Image (tube, rainbow, N blue to C red):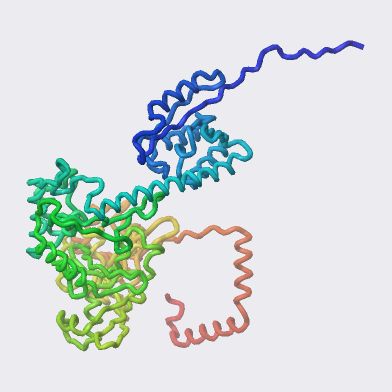
């Protein structure tokens, strides 16, 4: 028997190098650390490149950014992105505090990196995220790091508040109207003029919106070059610093981890420091402005005379959203209409939206109020005197709350096109159609089809079919004695091309030869030509397309018909037909 020997491969297996990156950060909390940022970068560059088993994947850096959040750390975000793209196998960092001071952020990031096979090594704590007890140690130490950050924050706050008690400003810097020069606030003459103008406009009765528009028209901008807006102007009007005094701790940071800033509404003490700098606005004027703002705020939108307000402004409320209804104008076909719409529909985020659909027509609103107040003609003064507010519980329904404590519910339906279809508008539109001047829906048959029973023209209507839409022409009035049927456009064109001896219907030839068409009953058309002759023809009905049905579908339909066609129903139909024969007599079956 032959002897068989196995020959092992002689080519050595090449060990794949690990792609290693490092992360370094200097906190906003301290300017100097045991190692500067440049020292950390140099250290990791040498460490990674001297290791023959490692491949350099870069050092990611964040300078003077707090570790309590990863959102604003661009270097950190770039590192995570590179890891997701498979460019990093190992991440080195000095300590847990350098990586993150937020326990939740730290654990979520480390777990994500672990899931994609990226190892994180913390040198100071000697922790490897891939080890068995790595996550447990990280959780404990990260909690200490977070609490250390909170402790540092509390110490800083204590120092800030102590300085406030002594009347010392923290983080001194200028604001609009002032520059910070040699540890003092100094008036900026050019900006001070704008501050004084903002206050003077308000004292003159102008709204903030009017001031905003004035500044925009004149090209006046903020210090950063942005447009003045309502919120900017409100900040100036409410900033007591313009009186030469300072109010300290107007805001505070709620949580050192989230860094969320809140207005101080009595949660913490405030400190009023007098005569700290030169005033732009005197205290008496400033206080008058605050009182006036409070008065206008109580009046609501009625205090802003620059708005297009009516007696209904601020009076119509949505009982679900809590918003007031807003006034809007809509223009269609050259006719303007006014409506009231729930204010939530113009907001970006309002939950599931307002359950009340549709808008309220301004004229319908007036009619409803006249009915409740027993008025022949609507009167703004009477409405404001007697009505407290109006609620809209459902579409086109109003609950009118009177000042005497009573409530009345009334319908306020929209009448649609009828509101604008006045005699003047009807006449103007008719003239346009006769002259064929850009009227929507106008065709070659407009004003050509006449009804002999109603003495009016046919009107075009569009109807949806299975394979698109089709135009129909029907009598505009269609009264009780009207016998005219609707004409399909393709059938009408097929009928008229034979009258004009054409192979295909031509609108140009039709305009030249046909004056008008009288539509009779039983599909009879009298075509009056421009040469004075008249031809009577029968309208050709287009053959309707049938929907294809499968054998199974036909069988199911047959079974359903048999189930519904009961003896009782058959007897009832027979009696109905017998009665119709008796009523029509000789006319039976002619239609």
Q: Which residue is found at the position 22% from the left and 87% from the top?
A: 373
The one nearer the camera, 399 or 93, is: 93
| Quadrant assignment for the C terminus | bottom left
The one of 202 and 149 positioned closer to us in this rendering? 149
Q: Is residue 434 above or below residue 478?
A: above
Q: Is residue 342 left or right of residue 174?
A: right
- Which residue appears at 22% of the width and 64% of the height? 330
Query: Which residue appears at 32% of the width and 49% of the height?
Result: 159
Estimate the x, y position of residue 229 in percent, counting from the top left. Answer: 19, 54
How many discs mark residues in the rendered view? 0
Q: Does 252 sit left or right of 352 as displayed?
A: left
Q: Position of residue 421 (x, y in %)?
A: 21, 71
Q: Quick one: 153 or 44, which is closer to the camera?
A: 153
Q: Which image quarter: residue 440?
A: bottom left
Quadrant of the frame with the N terminus = top right
Q: Give the left or right position of residue 99, taking residue 564 as reference.
A: left
414 above or below 195? below
**Left or right: where does residue 470 sit relative to residue 15?**
left
Percent coordinates x, y for residue 27 in the rendering: 38, 38
Residue 47 image point, x, y percent: 49, 22
> Quick check: can you spot residue 432?
yes
């Amino acid at each position: 028997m032959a002897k068989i020997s196995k020959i092992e491969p002689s080519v050595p297996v090449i060990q794949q190098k690990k792609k290693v990156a490092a992360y370094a950060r200097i906190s906003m909390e301290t300017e100097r650390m045991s190692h500067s940022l440049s020292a950390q970068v140099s250290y990791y560059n040498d460490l990674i490149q001297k290791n023959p088993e490692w491949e350099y994947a870069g050092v990611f850096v964040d300078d003077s950014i707090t570790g309590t959040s990863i959102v604003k750390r661009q270097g950190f975000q770039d590192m995570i992105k590179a890891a997701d793209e498979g460019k990093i196998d190992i991440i080195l960092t000095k300590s847990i505090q350098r990586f993150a001071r937020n326990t939740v952020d730290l654990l979520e990031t480390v777990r994500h990196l672990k899931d994609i096979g990226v190892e994180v090594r913390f040198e100071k704590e000697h922790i490897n995220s891939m080890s068995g007890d790595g996550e447990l140690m990280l959780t404990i130490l990260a909690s200490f790091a977070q609490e250390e950050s909170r402790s540092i924050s509390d110490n800083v706050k204590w120092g800030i508040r102590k300085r406030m008690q002594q009347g010392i400003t923290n983080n001194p810097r200028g604001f609009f109207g002032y520059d910070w020069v040699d540890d003092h606030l100094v008036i900026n003459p050019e900006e001070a003029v704008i501050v004084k103008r903002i206050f003077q406009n308000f004292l003159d009765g102008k709204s903030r919106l009017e001031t905003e528009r004035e500044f925009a028209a004149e090209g006046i901008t903020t210090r950063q070059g942005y447009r003045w807006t309502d919120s900017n102007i409100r900040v100036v009007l409410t900033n007591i610093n313009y009186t030469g005094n300072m109010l300290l701790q107007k805001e505070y940071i709620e949580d050192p981890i989230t860094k969320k800033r809140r207005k101080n509404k009595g949660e913490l003490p405030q400190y009023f420091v007098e005569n700290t700098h030169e005033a732009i606005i005197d205290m008496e004027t400033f206080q008058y402005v605050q009182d006036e703002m409070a008065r206008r705020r109580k009046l609501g939108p009625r205090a802003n005379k620059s708005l297009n307000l009516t007696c209904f402004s601020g009076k119509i409320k949505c009982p679900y959203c809590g918003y007031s209804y807003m006034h809007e104008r809509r223009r269609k076909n050259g006719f303007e209409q006014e409506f009231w719409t729930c204010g939530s529909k113009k907001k970006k985020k309002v939950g599931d939206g307002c359950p009340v659909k549709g808008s309220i027509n301004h004229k319908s609103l007036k009619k409803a109020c006249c009915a409740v107040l027993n008025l022949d003609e609507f009167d703004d003064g009477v409405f404001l005197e007697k009505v407290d507010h109006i609620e809209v519980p459902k579409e086109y329904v109003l609950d009118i709350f009177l000042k005497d404590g009573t409530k009345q519910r009334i319908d306020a339906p929209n009448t649609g096109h009828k509101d604008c279809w006045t005699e003047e508008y009807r006449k103007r539109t008719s003239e346009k159609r006769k002259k064929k001047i850009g009227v929507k829906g106008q065709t070659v048959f407009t004003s050509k089809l006449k009804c002999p029973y109603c003495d009016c023209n046919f009107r075009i209507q569009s109807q949806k079919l299975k394979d698109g839409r089709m135009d129909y022409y029907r009598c505009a009035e269609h009264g009780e004695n009207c016998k005219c049927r609707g004409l399909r456009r393709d059938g009408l064109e097929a009928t008229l091309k034979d009258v004009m001896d054409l192979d295909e219907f031509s609108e140009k030839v039709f305009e030249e030869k046909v004056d008008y068409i009288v539509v009779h009953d039983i599909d009879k058309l009298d075509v009056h030509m421009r040469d004075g002759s008249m031809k009577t023809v029968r309208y050709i009905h287009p053959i309707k397309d049938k929907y294809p049905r499968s054998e199974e579908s036909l069988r199911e339909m047959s079974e359903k018909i048999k189930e519904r066609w009961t003896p009782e129903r058959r007897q009832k139909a027979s009696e109905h037909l017998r009665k119709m024969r008796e009523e029509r007599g000789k006319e039976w079956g002619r239609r």
